[in-house]
Amino acid sequence: MTIQDRVIAIIAEQAVLDPADVTPESSLADLGIDSLGLVESIFAIEEAFDISIPFNANEPDKSDFDISSVASIIAGIEKLVAEQAGS
Amino acid sequence: MKRVVITGAGTINALGHDVPETLAAMREGRCGIGQLEFRDVERLSIQIGGQIKGFEAEGHFNRQQMTLYDRFTQFTLMAAREAIGQSGLEFSGDLANRAGVVLGTAGGGVSTWDDNYRAVYEEGKNRVHPFVVPKLMMNAAASHVSMEYNLRGPSFTVSTACASSNHAMAHAFQMVRSGMSPVMVTGGSESMLCFGGIKAWEGLRVMSKDACRPFSANRNGMVQGEGAGIFVFEEFEHARARGADILAEVAGFGMSSDAADIVMPSKQGAARAISGAMRDAGIAADKVGYINAHGTGTAANDKTECAAVADVFGPHADRLMISSTKSMHGHLIGATGAVELLACVMALRDGIIAPTIGYEEFDPECALDVVPNEAREAQVEVALSNAFAFGGLNAVLALRRV
């Protein structure tokens, strides 16, 4: 499974949707994921990839990690996974 | 001042998953205490408890709810469903805005603390689930009841160790009696039966390894239980106007503080709470037919409690019945008063006095009618429910037959 597939599976589970319905351009809000669901999704992604995501729920827009869409989340995770592999 | 009645009751505990099962067990003098089952139990020197068996959160709650509900919250919601269902109340409009929920717990989400400490300390994990805090907080159960039933009035959690639910119910009673709220949901919940929960209690060396035998000369300590008891307290006219089935009247309460010792009970403190409850309810001592004792099965509590009862009631102490149902369901700590109030309701409503089981040997320091081993039929007009907590905080409720 690619990083993209795994992230989409996690988000789909959180949103109680079929992974096919989780498109890259959708935002988490579009998928019905609230703030608590967002924090839970980030936890699940951290657990799955053993990475640490720089995200502060107080300032989601100012975080280094872009959560504006599924695609941006996937891109951010790919970067973190790559950095971790290189370190 | 308004009169306050109970129009709904719910429970889950080691004797049953609802009120009818629990009362049937109390009538039969059945023991719910047995071998504890959870992770690392073999490392405990105390391995018995009144553990709830056969309960699975799956089927009662959805996946999202289960990630948010500690076991003490699950117990609360099960009992609340039964109690509020029985009351027949639905909360909307002005009633919803004035009705609230006051619950007692001593430990809150103990197993959530336990599981996550284990993860970060023992297993070396550096990340915990985001819901750890909302799951373990002491008010989680009260908050989820408020959300589930749209209770928008005064709501909070009271924590006074083993008297938590009696203090909570006394407070809810006050709120209805004063006219502040027509309906309050109240009671308590506890779930400490996990490795850390029992290990902490082991340290005090007050736990029995074999059985809870309150008032028996050969008693050797308390046994922990778990579960919840929830009640609907309703203003009498409000209940009567809608033709609600009234289980009993809450007539009064007494509270006191020993101001003496953090663990040893005081006869004077207990006596002041008992006499305070009767004074508050306007009930003469000789009208009390049954006392559900705190009756923990420790050497200190039982003799102190009996001495307090003897002092308060004088010659009538020999005529009333006093039993400890902890012998059957164990000590539910912050929830214990709530589950034990069911025995008082049964005494008043059904005329059946729950026994003190495991009673084997007469103790001259507990020379009262403790209803040994077998339930008894008796007409009772007034019943008291005692709770005397560590820290010397006492709360006694008085119920009257309706």
Image: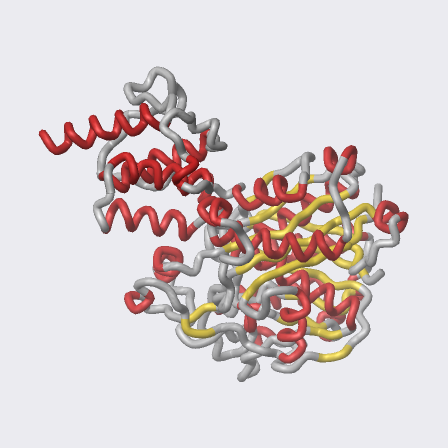
Q: Is B109 in front, or is B298?
A: B109
**B101 on left or right of B244:** left
Residue closest to the far left: A87
Which x, y percent locates residue B73?
53, 50
Q: Quadrant of the C terminus of chain B?
A: bottom right
Furthest residue toward top: A62
A48 and A2: which is toward the camera? A2
Q: Residue at x 71, y 44 (%)?
A: B184
Instruction: Indicate the quadrant where residue B312 lies.
Output: bottom right
Q: Residue at x 67, y 39 (%)?
A: B150
The answer to whether residue B391 is seen in the rendering is no
Please name whichever residue, B190 or B377, is drawn nearer the observer in this view of the structure: B190
Structure colour scheme: secondary structure
Count up the numbered dots: 0
Left or right side of B309 for B36? left
Q: Position of residue B315 (x, y in %)?
A: 75, 71
Instruction: Work out which quarter of the rendered image holds the N terminus of chain B and state it.
Output: top right
Q: Is residue B149 left or right of residue B377?
A: left
Q: Residue at x 90, y 48 (%)?
A: B241
Q: Where is B2 relative to B279, above or below?
A: above
Residue extending furthest right?
B241
The image quadrant that residue B126 belongs to is: top left
Residue shown at 54% from the left, 76% from the top: B31
Residue B336 visible within the image: yes
Front residue of B57/B135: it is B57
Q: Position of residue A82 (x, y in %)?
A: 16, 30
